[in-house]
Amino acid sequence: MAAARAHWGSKFGFVMAAAGSAVGLGNLWKFPYITWENNGGAFVLVYLAAVVVLGMPIMMAEILVGRRAQLSSVPAFEKLGNKGWSTVGWLGVVAGAVILSYYMVIAGWSIKSFIQCMGWSISGYEAPTKDAFGQFLANGPLQIGLTAIFTVATAVIVFRGIGGGIEAATKIMMPILVLIMLYLVATSLTMDGRDQALAMIFNPDFSKLPASGVLMAVGQAFFSLSLGLGAMVAYGSYISKKESIFGSALWVVILDTSFALLACIAMFTIIYSVPGLDERISGSTVGMLFITLPDLFYTQMPGGIILAPLFFILVAFAALSSTISLGEVVTSLMIDKRGWSRHKATIVCASIIFVGSILAGLSLGAVGPLSNFEIFEGKAGVLSTLDHLAANWLLPLGGLGTTIFVGWYLGKKDTLEELGLTRGTIPFHVWLWCLRIVAPVAIIALLVAVIAGWDFS
Ligand code: TRP
């Protein structure tokens, strides 16, 4: 007989764990640089719309599936649906492995920044040369070494089981990260680039946003909220039946979105305020997080020499709590569905993912053919290709499967009961029709538009 499923101690426990999964490199590394590349305003607005119309309803849907089935994604879809529906779960496993293989590489950059900041804090800050970051990216052995550190750290934690340590650590680290972020933003707002930065983020100009940019915004909403691959299904299975799914999801969405916006405000202000910085990021926008913030820490901020290394350690932790949630999705399935031991599952999955990481790590300039090939227009190299494939295609498709499953296949009786309702209220119907019609139509239309090469502008 199966043992009763353990539950989070409280709603706070769930929100912190889910926010730990959601808040990560997606908010700090990816959102600011793709917002920059897509000219701000309109992109941000589409992103926020996607969070409200797709993110929030699908977050609730994933949690609902997990709590209803009391299982993680593939078995949950099998139990509530049938073998066919479990394809949605398996798609998520593939997406998880793809994301991990490049996520580990970026996570490795935070270790490098930490070490670099330690050096600056001890012997004084010296603004890096224009192409310093590009050279770092092109250093293949270093990229692989840093990735290896991160892969091993994640594998060890996943192998031991997530419980205890890491959850406790996230609960302490996340609030500290929030405080430093707020301090960063407050300091940056005293700089003269502020108005230009805020205008760029909050003044939409739709003529600057192509269809592919809309898909990127939607994909980023999935990526940042950890949706589309069943991660929230697993977390949802641990929420107590007494908690409100709406309330829990809302907290995670608000925390995650605030983080992303705050990161943008700080970084863009720095770029507009420090002469020559736009040139330093122009060649490697992907490095924006790592290039811009040290300038603020070391030249503007009281206490910056202490906070800079601390900040990058926390970035590494935010990344770690995300890699663990992804790693857990991938390995736990091999354990449940393939009958592997946790030991075998962790080693096999980590090795396969590491091979992907090596290819991604060498695609930043170290190895020509890996860096230059292009499947998606404008996304050259293995790392960009994997990122684009996962965020813009696999996650929205996974999300589409979930909306149709919860909207059409699961009976209203199940959904109502799980949401703690006795009859369909107006908010319930708004949510349901969002899942039934609005979200699927939006996702399909967008994928078709991009395949057909449409341009809205
Ligand atoms: N949301 C995380 C970030 O923004 C990445 C992540 C963790 C993720 N778990 C996920 C993305 C599950 C999609 C699905 O960095």
Image: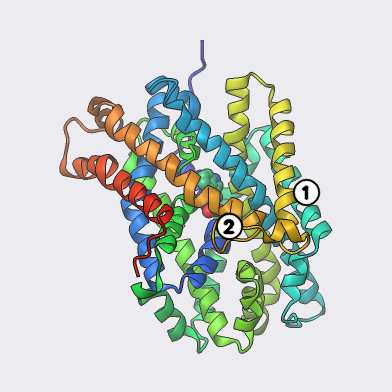
290 or 132: nearer the eye? 132
Q: Residues within 10 Å of mark 1 (few under 14, many from 20)?
A: some
Query: Residue 307: x percent and y percent?
Result: 66, 70
Q: Which residue is drawn at 68% across and 61% down?
A: 372
Which amino acid, mark 1?
A: Ala
* Residue 126: assigned label: none
348 or 300: nearer the eye? 348
Instruction: Say which residue label 1 marks.
Output: 148
**Mark 1 or mark 2: which comes first in sequence?**
2
Q: Residue at x 81, y 75 (%)?
A: 122
Query: Residue 392: x percent and y percent?
Result: 48, 52
Instruction: Say which residue label 2 marks.
Output: 25
Q: How crowded is mark 2: few (under 14 residues within 10 Å), some or many (20 or more)?
A: many
Query: Residue 373: x percent and y percent?
Result: 66, 57
Is the CB–ligand 1 distance for label 1 below 8 Å? no
Picture quadrant where residue 195 is located: bottom left
Q: Which colour scheme is used?
A: rainbow
Q: Residue at x 39, y 31 (%)?
A: 65
Picture quadrant where residue 414 is located: top left
Up-down: is 242 above or below 121? above
